[in-house]
Image: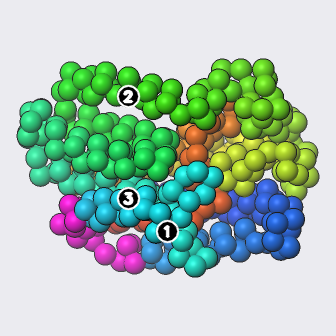
Amino acid sequence: MRQERINLSITVLTLICFGIIMIYSASCVNAMQTFGDSMYFLKRHLLFLTLGLVASFFIMRMDYRRIQPFARPLIGLCVLLLIFVLIPHIGNESYGARRWFKLGVFHFQPSELAKLALIIYTADFLHRKQHLVRSFRYGFLPPLIVMGILCALTVKQPDLGTTVEMAVVTLTMLFLGGARLWHLGLVFGSAVPVLVYLIVKEPYRMARIIAFLDPWQDSQGIGFQLTQSQIALGSGGLFGVGLGHSKQKLFYLPAAHTDFILSIIGEELGLIGTLTVITLFCLFIWQGTRIVRQTNNAFGYFLGMGIVMMLGLQAMVNVGVSIGAFPTKGLPLPFISYGGSALIFHLAAIALLLNISKVEDY
């Protein structure tokens, strides 16, 4: 599978390089205005990228199967971190959310580790007890309880987008592992009213739904972010206004270098640039799936499939939010958006996927 590893690596590296260029373009004005350094966000992004590549190097040198015994302790660590981050003066609060530990210049987001840890745990569980997965009590309920604990702590931060992502990936892995459809249907049926309650309970979530349904009704209020995103995408036309010439990044579009970086890509590089990014993610999903399908080890199969689904789903949601197909969610575009913990753990996940392919060659 050497060629598959090379192809996947080229695709991911292309996305990373694309991200480096666009992060500087999207953030330079904001960085100069706020910090007096147009390269402020770019420098930090390169630091996180370096940390992620170093971590990936060490992951690639080991056998991915060696992490399997640590699946349950890793979940325990994540539970503790998600509890501690909710404690005032320990977890860092920003814009009403308490999701980070502040460690000098680095902001560590434990939910990013929890996403990957949950995939590792579910893959390990399915490897050991796939023959029991059709049993609700012994094969379906245990991973469901673990998922529920992590999701409950994550939504408490609050971070509903990451919560839904963890649930969807875990349940899909259980489906691939052979879980009964009526068990999955029972969970889905129970989750819908809970999800509706969580949305209705918080005014800002309801505002996002209203803005999603008709952002132009209140384009200067709750629909501001979505309308500015659509203006950016529409202004780019086919070939864009030119790299670095975006007008929406001039304090019109919030989160231009994070959650809505695709909108700046669309404005500066046009439909061609946007479709290029989407095509690269489609290539990633296809190449990642090819690696997973050739994997003989059950743990590697479920681990790889979980990683591909996590990154593919996050990319799909981010693109959908940018074009107005989904309500606003705080999920960055993998490898392209400015980020700390997300970028590091996404690179670690890719290293695990490449490691699966590497081990299968021996």
Q: Give left or right: position of 304 versus 206.
A: left
Q: Identify the image quadrant of the C terminus.
A: bottom left
* Residue ID for mark 1: 89
Amino acid at circle 1: His
Please tell me which residue is depicted at 21% across the width and 21% down the height of the picture: 182
Local crowd size for mark 2, using a 10 Å CA cut-off: few (<14), some (14–19), many (≥20): few
Local crowd size for mark 1, using a 10 Å CA cut-off: few (<14), some (14–19), many (≥20): few
Taking depth in this image into account, of 337 and 303 the one nearest to the observer is 337
Taking depth in this image into account, of 8 and 198 the one nearest to the observer is 198
Q: Is residue 207 magenta?
A: no
Give the SS element for disc 1: loop
Prevailing SS of the magenta stretch: helix
Q: Quadrant of residue 328?
A: top right
* Residue ID for mark 3: 82
Labels 2, 1: front one: 1
Q: Which mark is residue 194?
A: 2
Q: Earlier in the sequence, mark 1 or mark 3?
A: 3
Distance of label 2 from label 3 (alpha carbons): 21 Å
The magenta segment is 58-73
Q: Earlier in the sequence, mark 2 or mark 3?
A: 3
Of all residues, the one furthest to the front in this rendering is 88
Q: Earlier in the sequence, mark 2 or mark 1?
A: 1
Q: Position of residue 123 (x, y in %)?
A: 24, 51
Give the SS element for disc 2: helix
